[in-house]
Structure formats: structure tokens, C-alpha cells
Image: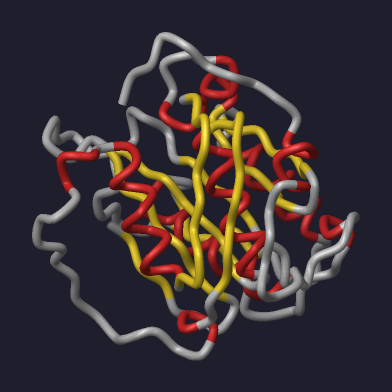
């Protein structure tokens, strides 16, 4: 998805516009939390395929929302394992530092209670999907599945009304949690952050594919281990 205009406005104003039916379990300084000795880890190499579940797991054990964006030249396709990077016993910050040291094309930050792991080059790229401007985005009494669909419909209005295919287990309790979001003058990144903040126990990820029909995938995961990607 390309855009000639990107709005890099502070997420603090965006977060103030969020209304939620559930309070976030996070607080400032989530990166100082210590992970349990086991099982937090990430498979090597540090590919998109391995980082998506690792970030979901890290969010689950840290009880902190994480937003992960994969490299646009590292599509979300299966990659054989060549080793394991242990993160157990580290603080969240130390775990992220290990990942960035192993794959320095990424950088991480913590903004308004959401931890981001994104390609360094993407953060200032006006053509990056997550930097695309969003004037207004609203959700009322929705689940994460509903939110996922609405994000796609916003980005590609022609998808609305079409069949949505999916598979896998149904949502657990946190996947059924309902919430509201009202946000304006932000970016796609701000929208995704607002969704996980409003939900209170979820993370998001965006990955890219070598398919012009479906160039990107967006997913949400909950702290009880359920997730959905489309």
C-alpha cells in the first residue's frame, strides 16, 4: 500500500481519543518487566516467520501490547529453524535488545504503553503502509475479529461485502472481549495501537507477501494465546 502523504503526529493525542470498554493491563515501563525462565524464546534465523509468534509470546508473558512489523523484503513464509535465541529471565528490554542485535535492520521503542518492533527504514518512509494517514476511524462494540476486518476495509474499501475466509480455532475469552475505538488525525500505526490499547490484552503484527493481490497481512493476538491474521 502506497501513500504520498504520511502524518507523524504524537500518539499521545491519539490515545486520548480512544474510548475503551476494558482498561489496558499495561503501564509505563513495561520493558522493565522480567520474563519467566521458560519458555520465552525465538527461533533462528530471525525471520518474519519466526518473529511473529515470538512477539505474540513476548506480549503474552510480559502482559504488554506489542506491535510488530516485518521487513518488506522478508515475506511471511515458512523458514527452517537453525537454532534458538533464549529470552527467558531477561527483561523485555533485554529481550528486544537481543533481537535487534541479531537483526539490526529492526529497531524497537515504547510509546504510550505499546512496544514497537519495526524495520528502522520503515519509520521515516512516507510510502510505508503503517505511516499512511487516517483522518477518522471508529469502532463500536466490536471484537478483535471485527476490528481486523474494519482495518482491511478502511485500507481497501473494495473488500467490503466480499467473502472472508478463515480457519483455525475460534476465539477464546479474550478474543470475545468487546471494545470501542474513536480516533482521528493519526496513521495506520496509530489505529492498530488504539485497537490493542482499547482491547487491553492484545498485540498486533503486520507482515508482507510476494503477492500483488495481497501485499500485506494484518493480525491480532491475545494474551490467552488466541490470534487471527488476514
Of the 4 image quadrants, the one containing the N terminus is top left
Q: How many marks?
A: 0
Residue at 59%, 77% (x, y): give it: 223
Find residue 156 and report its image quarter. Answer: top left
Residue at 65%, 44% (x, y): give it: 116
Residue 87 visible: yes
Q: Nearer the viewer, residue 146 or 26?
A: 146
Q: Is residue 135 above or below residue 70?
A: above
Where residue 169 appears, as percent x and y from the top left, is: 29, 86
Find residue 36 and report its image quarter. Answer: bottom right
- Looking at this rendering, what residue extends furthest in the bottom direction? 173
Q: Nearer the viewer, residue 20 or 214?
A: 20
Q: Nearer the viewer, residue 168 or 7?
A: 7
Residue 227 placement, left or right of 63: left
Q: Is residue 43 above or below residue 166?
A: above
Residue 161 placement, left or right of 108: left
Residue 84 visible: no
Of the 4 image quadrants, the one containing the C terminus is bottom left
Residue at 62%, 79% (x, y): give it: 39
Residue 178 placement, left or right of 227: right
Where residue 180 appears, as percent x and y from the top left, is: 58, 64
Amino acid at each position: 500500500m502506497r501513500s504520498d502523504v504520511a502524518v507523524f503526529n504524537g500518539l499521545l493525542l491519539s490515545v486520548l481519543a480512544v474510548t475503551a470498554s476494558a482498561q489496558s493491563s499495561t503501564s509505563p515501563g513495561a520493558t522493565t518487566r522480567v520474563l519467566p525462565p521458560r519458555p520465552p524464546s525465538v527461533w533462528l534465523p530471525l525471520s518474519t516467520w519466526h518473529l511473529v509468534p515470538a512477539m505474540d509470546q513476548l506480549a503474552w508473558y510480559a502482559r504488554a501490547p506489542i506491535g510488530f512489523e516485518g521487513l518488506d523484503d522478508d515475506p511471511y513464509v515458512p523458514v527452517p529453524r537453525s537454532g534458538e535465541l533464549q529470552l527467558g529471565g531477561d527483561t523485555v528490554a533485554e529481550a528486544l535488545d537481543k533481537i535487534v542485535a541479531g537483526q539490526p535492520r529492526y529497531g524497537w521503542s515504547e510509546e504510550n504503553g505499546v512496544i514497537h518492533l519495526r524495520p528502522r527504514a520503515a519509520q521515516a518512509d512516507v510510502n510505508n503502509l503503517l505511516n499512511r494517514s487516517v483522518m477518522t476511524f471508529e469502532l463500536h462494540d466490536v471484537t478483535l475479529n471485527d476490528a481486523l476486518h474494519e482495518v482491511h476495509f478502511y485500507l481497501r474499501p473494495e473488500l467490503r461485502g466480499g467473502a472472508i475466509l478463515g480457519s483455525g480455532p475460534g476465539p477464546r475469552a479474550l478474543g470475545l472481549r468487546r471494545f470501542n475505538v474513536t480516533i482521528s488525525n493519526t496513521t495506520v500505526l496509530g489505529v492498530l495501537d488504539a485497537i490493542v490499547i482499547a482491547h487491553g490484552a492484545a498485540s498486533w503484527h503486520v507482515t508482507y507477501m510476494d503477492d500483488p493481490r495481497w501485499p500485506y497481512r494484518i493480525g491480532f493476538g491475545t494474551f490467552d494465546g488466541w490470534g487471527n491474521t488476514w
